[in-house]
Amino acid sequence: MKTRKILINGAGLGGLTAACCLMKAGHEVEVFEQSAQMGEVGAGIQISANAQHVLRELGLGDEIDRAGVRPGAYVFRLHDTGEEIQRFPLAEEHERINGAPYTQMHRADFHEILARKSHAMKEGVVQLNKRATHYVETNDGVELYFADGSWARGDLLIGADGIRSVVRAQMSGAANPVYTGDAAWRLVIPTEKLPPKLLEPVMSVFMGPGGHAVCYYLRAGKLLNFVGLVETDDLAEESWTLKRPWDQLKANYAGWHPIIQTIIDTADKDQCYRWSLFNRDPLMNWSTKRITLLGDSCHATLPYLAQGAVMAIEDAAILARALDVSADDAEALDIYQRNRIERTARIVRQSTANRRLFHLHSEAEIRTAFAKRDEGADRNKWLYSYNPLKVQLV
């Protein structure tokens, strides 16, 4: 295998996973992060089997098990009565079918696990306060330049810098996001403040009209994660840290099930976050001879399939494998994107389609839609069953 020096712009979940996969494969890696400190927002994340294969290969399975929760099932309910419309098993069944578990955990916990692993593999692998401005690609390498006047040189550059990717912007131009008409509320509530056994330990989705709410547990059941998706003309920033008034949240869910009312009423009224959701068309070409993209920088997705971070983890594993297949840099990057574009585009489009499914405006429409679709069987067939470590590269 050809050993390369690889620069990664961005120390988020995708960037750190890529760093770990690439260092495990024997490459020299440097990661650059524009923030002054490492960290993630206070929100939940779902990690299905297709990503867990990679994390277990990195030796992180036990840590993730300790930090996370394995939900018993994925349950779809009507927004007002709470009537169960469809359920498919997770927990043991998910692992039996797909070869690895389904885990829900706090994003900050997951990020910390990845950061700790990457620094154990190479002390100081992440450099902070490094805001990239542009890159220069040559025949024999790539240079990445920063706002502080410094620069770094490597054989390859990976843009793992998210929806506002500097690398993507220079490579392919602006992403041109389009507002979906939806906004997402985010709450994390200590379960000790909630009535005992308010919700069973499953992934609960309350649906319609014109919105849905997702509830699941974090940190061994010590926290409840709530994500509320609502249709609104009140356009705001695309920022996970934008606070909004509690009474707005309460009004958005008027008439919804008592469980939803209890969660909202228990929430810290000064810690209600809401951001606007934008659609971006997935890129159909995201590599040059020495530069490629990963994660949200090339296939940002709506949060209606719980696969955003999972796709980035898959990307990291396939990229490491592609670099092992070919000693030619351009060919290796072509193998990487060729084996990722179709799948990631399908996930992005399915997530967009789920937005319509979850927001149907009548009970009859919801019943009809779910009667025609077995959500669990569909996902197990093509989504969760994918193993980035073993799938044949073409």
Image (cartoon, grey):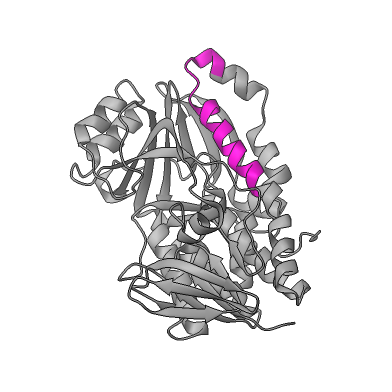
Residue 377, quarter of the rendered image:
top right
Q: Based on the picture, tell me whether residue 218 belongs to the magenta stretch.
A: no
Residue 324, quarter of the rendered image:
bottom right
In the picture shown, does residue 368 fall above or below 160? above
Q: Which residue lies furthest to the bottom in this view?
A: 123
Q: Which residue is drawn at 47% across and 37% down?
A: 204
Taking 34 as reference, is 134 left or right?
Answer: right
Residue 139 percent location from the top left of the image = 65, 76
Q: Can residue 102 be seen in this view?
A: no
The secondary structure that most of the magenta stretch takes on is helix
Taking 190 as reference, is 132 left or right?
Answer: right
Picture quarter with the N terminus: bottom right
In the picture shown, does residue 339 fall above or below 11? above
Q: Based on the picture, tell me whether residue 349 belongs to the magenta stretch.
A: yes
Query: Along the line of sight, which residue is nearer the eye, 41 or 377?
Result: 41
Query: Along the line of sight, which residue is nearer the eye, 51 or 260?
Result: 51
Query: Along the line of sight, which residue is nearer the eye, 217 or 21?
Result: 21
Magenta residues, start to end: 344-365
Q: Can residue 45 be seen in this view?
A: yes
Residue 120 percent location from the top left of the image = 48, 83
Residue 198 percent location from the top left of the image = 36, 39
Disc count in the image? 0
Taking 111 as reference, is 267 left or right?
Answer: left
Picture quarter with the C terminus: bottom right
In the picture shown, does residue 329 fall above or below 221? below
In the picture shown, does residue 193 fall above or below 337? above
Residue 215 percent location from the top left of the image = 41, 41
